[in-house]
Image: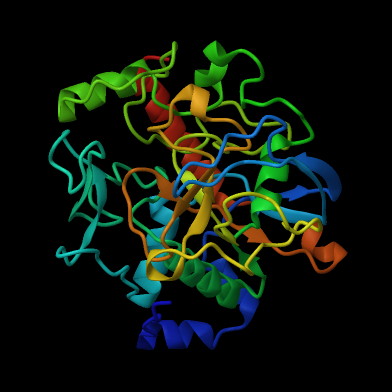
Amino acid sequence: MKKIAFTPTLIIVLMLPLAAQAAHVIEPVMVAIPAGQFMMGSATPTPAQPGSPSDGPAHKVAVKAFKISKYELTVGEFRQFVDATSYSPAGMGDAKDGCWKWVKPGDGPWPGMPMAVTPGRWNTPAYAPGEHHPVMCVSWDDAHAYAAWLSKRTGKKYRLPSEAEWEYAARAGGDAEFPSGADLKGICHVANIMDKSGKAAFLRDLGWNRKDAECDDLAEYTTVVGMYQPNAFGLYDMAGNVGEYVEDCEHLDYVGAPADGSAWTANCTAGEGGGMIMTRGGSYGSRDADLRWSTRGHAGPSNLSSMGEGIRLVQQIDSRADLRTAPNRFEAELAKAQQAERARRGK
């Protein structure tokens, strides 16, 4: 894990009482999720492909109460962390500030996989077109660094969700297979995925004719968080926009998975660089038929990608006081960004 550089300004701020420190931080808007049980995974699991995890077998999991971010972590929220600490995600490959991106067919290092590491980072305009877009080109390691900083600044316990917590929060008490229920034509109301606008953008920019959903939300790539209908828990973008890191390492199926909602971090699937970690929720590049609540993705712990991997945090609940929610100035600014995005779309 990368180290945070503690500048003189940051050291002075950290000497302040926690309440004073927290007043200077825009914290993620959190939603309290009640304890409960659910069936995790799919009753008709996708067969495990070489190097890809299956979403079965379905199994019952009991989850304790917790809080989870109402929105995906934004460029602006990550920027305050970088500005306060001088933290810098390391680049990948030969690019000092490189991250994975979609490329034209044939331009990638592997036949049939149009992606490559190119110059770019979390604040590159193409990947971060606005402060209220979800942050990308950040890794699982970077997510841990941000959560540790936020915890220290606020005195609260922020962390990544377990894979079970994520799916429990996403399903929100329902048993539908897809975010839009049985009707995939309505998926553009609840998720930013590969729709008609996305297909047109990939064809224009990359010459790549991708299969698209039979709907259109007028967003080409990522968009301002919170633009789509929330789920029953009031959470936005649990499907699409960017995928979200969870705490669990990769297992190719759920045989032996914990039944208590905790992160599965033992007996991980071996892989390049010591193994992979899990991501959930799909992205702006996901096809509708691939975007089931049970769908599992993976990435390397230090992976940096503009193809749709981001962050959503959990706040651990240790007492009844942790269940309280407070007004958050983030949403006032977000509302302005959403209004501007609706105007751009002509809605």
Can the viewer see residue 61? yes
Above/below status of 171 relative to 305: above
Can the viewer see residue 326? no
Residue 54: x and y in percent read 58, 42
Q: Residue at x 79, y 40 (%)?
A: 39
Task: Give the mark count.
Answer: 0
The answer to whether residue 35 is left or right of residue 229 is right
Q: Residue at x 39, y 85 (%)?
A: 6
> Toward the viewer: 130 or 243?
243
Residue 7: x and y in percent read 36, 85
> Toward the viewer: 268 or 20?
268
Q: Quadrant of residue 120?
A: bottom left
Residue 269: x and y in percent read 53, 62
Q: Quadrant of the N terminus?
A: bottom left
Q: Quadrant of the C terminus?
A: top left
The way the protein has been coloured in the rendering is: rainbow
Above/below status of 284 relative to 166: above
Above/below status of 279 relative to 231: below
The answer to whether residue 189 is left or right of residue 68 is left
The answer to whether residue 96 is left or right of residue 132 is left
Residue 185: x and y in percent read 53, 11
Q: Residue at x 54, y 42 (%)?
A: 48
> Toward the viewer: 292 or 147?
292
